[in-house]
Image (cartoon, rainbow, N blue to C red):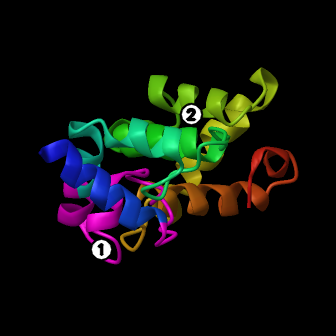
Amino acid sequence: MIMKKLLAIALLASSSMAIADDDVGCGLGTILFAGQSGVVPKVLAATTNGTYGNQTFGITSGTLGCKSDGVITSRARLSMFMGTNSERLARDMSVGQGEALNVLADLMGVKEQDKSLFFKTTQQHFSTIFAADNKTAGDVLAALNKVMAQDSTLATYAAV
């Protein structure tokens, strides 16, 4: 009975052209909490998406805001990494070094010879990158890319 209800919702959702949220992905939770903002709806959407295996269904069927032919973008990987490691990244950026910051540099494709500049730049611009109005991982990533775009060496790694 539950599967029939999910299938009905999925079929309805397939015609609604919902777009997956950068933070929570696609799935039934994305459809149910569409248009809502804040931590609680995002957590509920992500939990709903992951709990019932509906993301897999959405991806394979191209419904629930999912694309069956999509590719995992580096921006999506960065947002996921930043979202799950924001406290460690904030700590590492504030001191200009650390494991999480090094992994972020790797994910962004920063070459070894440019990492020290990357670390120093994130430390110097910490308050801009983690500004109070940067509420999501996407906001923090956008601020980081903006800071990097201002440096001729780091601009090649920024996706603005």
Residue 47 in view: yes
**Frontmost residue, 61 versus 44:** 61
Q: Where is residue 55 in the image (x, y as percent from the top left)?
A: 39, 42
Asked if residue 60 is among those painted magenta in the image, a careful observer would answer no
Please name the residue that numbered disc 2 is placed on. Answer: 104
> SS of the residue at dot 1?
loop
Residue 119 x/y as whole percent = 61, 37
Label pair 1/2, CB-CB below 8 angstroms: no
Label 2: which secondary element: helix
- Identify which residue is drawn at 26% across, 66% down: 32
Q: Can residue 94 be seen in this view?
A: no
Label 1 packing within 10 angstroms: few (<14), some (14-19), many (20+): few
Pair 1/2: label in front: 1
The crowding category of the residue bearing disc 2, from other C-alpha atoms within 10 Å (few below 14, some 14 to 19, many at least 20), is some
Residue occupying the far bottom of the picture:
35
In x, y percent, where is residue 58?
A: 44, 46
Which residue is at a point 79% across and 46% down the rendered structure image? 154
Question: Where, quadrant-wise, is the N terminus in this rendering?
Answer: top left
Whether the magenta-drawn stretch holds residue 22 is answered as yes
Q: Is the magenta stretch mostly helix, strand or loop?
A: loop
- Residues rendered magenta in the picture: 15-44
Residue type, numbered disc 1: Ser
Q: What residue type is labelled 2?
A: Leu
| Relative depth, front residue between 8 and 83 | 8
Q: Is residue 37 above or below residue 65?
A: below
CA separation in Å, label 1 and label 2: 26 Å
Judging by the rendered image, the residue that carries numbered circle 1 is 37
